[in-house]
Image (tube, rainbow, N blue to C red):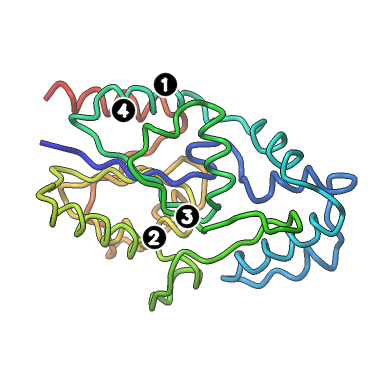
Amino acid sequence: MKFLLIFDFDHTIIDDNSDTWIVRCAPEKNLPNELKDSYEKGKWNEYMGRVFKYLGDKGIREYEMKRTMTEIPFTEGMIELINFVGKNKDIFDCIIISDSNTVFIDWILEAAKVRDLFDEVFTNPAAFNDNGYLILEGVHVHNCDKCPKNLCKKKVMIEFIDKQLQKGVKYTQIIYLGDGENDFCPITSLTKNDVAMPRKGYSLYNLISDMPQDASLEPSIVIWSSASEILSHLKLLTKE
């Protein structure tokens, strides 16, 4: 009997958005209006590429970015939750699916000494080039018209579960923790045995709350505000 925990990152593991937090590195902790106004819906990755270029042009280097990023607060109770999962790896596998990037996530998790507790992290590949600029790529190519073109979280989730099945790992239950609009697509493919856990007051919670009465999701819906509530739910599972 094994459970799969799927974590979003921004506003789920951490209590802010890593992509907007990096703006604290910019001159006067702000971006020019023409850069802010250049965002197009569904093209966040391209927008962040322009933000990173701007920071590079302003001489903001890796060590400054890292120092800033590791100051992001974790969501209340999240470190305790992650450590609990780490102590129960015979019961839980856990992965991250995020529209952040590899550099930010690794910095933040490693600073908190919890990176090794996650089995895999699926996010936008990023690296610093020879000129000290952070360069961003997309996760994959997909055909989902509901998701940003660089990432369909449902595709990542299904491919991971299929890969595990080929290794002989079949999950008793999938538990999906998220907050954003791009977390809606993956939970639509969960079954009645699974659990979707939207964070109260955020976009995913609002999308579920606003669904028509004749529409429904198969998984159980468990709403949370702090990670201590998620931990209480997981502790019940380990006692069953």
Residue type marked 4? Val
Tag 1 secondary structure: helix
Measure how far apart labels 1 and 3 are at the Cα level.
23 Å
Which residue in the structure is indicated by mark 4?
Answer: 85
The quarter of the image holding the N terminus is: top left
Q: Quadrant of residue 228?
A: top left
As measured in the structure, the alpha-carbon distance from the residue carrying label 2 to the one carrying label 4 is 22 Å
Instruction: List the single residue furthest toward the front.
Output: 130
Residue 142 percent coordinates (x, y): 39, 75
Q: Residue at x 47, y 55 (%)?
A: 123
Q: Which mark is residue 80?
A: 1
- Give the residue at x 19% y 28%: 237
The residue labelled by disc 3 is 123
Three-letter amino acid code of the residue under disc 1: Glu
Whole-Å distance between the Cαs marked 4 and 1?
9 Å
The quadrant holding residue 126 is: bottom right
Which comes sooner in the sequence, label 1 or label 2? 1
Q: CA distance from mark 4 to mark 3?
A: 21 Å
Marks 2/3 in contact by CB < 8 Å: the verdict is no
Q: Nearer the viewer's eye, disc 2 or disc 3?
A: 3
Q: CA distance from mark 1 to mark 2?
A: 25 Å
In this view, the residue in front, 103 or 132, is: 132
Q: Secondary structure at mark 2?
A: helix
What quarter of the picture does the C terminus occupy? top left
